[in-house]
Image (tube, rainbow, N blue to C red):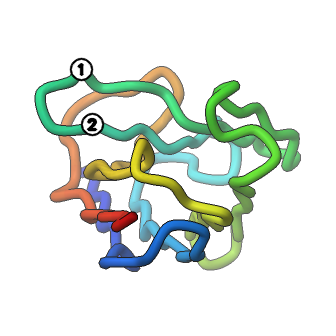
Amino acid sequence: QVQLVESGGGLVQSGGSLTLSCAASVTNFSSRVLGWYRQAPGSQLEFVAAVTRRGTTNYADSVKGRFALTRDNAQEMVYLQLNNLNSEDTAIYYCNTIPYSPPWGQGTQVTVSS
């Protein structure tokens, strides 16, 4: 049974920071590529960042240099540090495997005010 629970979102001013957390109960967590996606209002789901089982990361160009993705295999947690946020980062953020598969969690809302 896959269960994904995201948390840590909120309202932040432009230039601010947030840390998102994901409790990911998935089969063979430590061997899976995990990541974050986001969906802004009226937009399609987009890839944000991924981390391999060994900690190698990959980021969308739009967040490169501002976001940092880490994982804790022992706790089965994935974290996304969001820095220097801007209004284009406003979205619901979801964690999932890479490639993604259902079910999705409820996501966590990030709202950046200018």
- Earlier in the chain: of badge 1 and badge 2, it is 2
Disc number for residue 44: 1
Q: Is residue 31 left or right of residue 55?
A: left
Q: Is residue 54 left or right of residue 25?
A: right
Check whether the beta carbons of the residues at disc 1 and disc 2 lie within 8 A of each other: yes
Quadrant of the rendered structure where residue 13 is?
A: bottom left
Mark 2: few/some/many CA within 10 Å (<14, 14-19, 20+): some
Question: 20 above or below 34?
Answer: below
Name which residue lies at 30% across and 67% down: 5
Q: Position of residue 102 (x, y in %)?
A: 22, 32
Q: CA distance from mark 1 to mark 2?
A: 6 Å
Q: Position of residue 17 (x, y in %)?
A: 59, 75
Q: Which residue is mark 2?
A: 39
Label 2: state its secondary structure: strand
Name which residue lies at 39% across and 64% down: 114
Disc number for residue 26: none
Mark 1: few/some/many CA within 10 Å (<14, 14-19, 20+): few
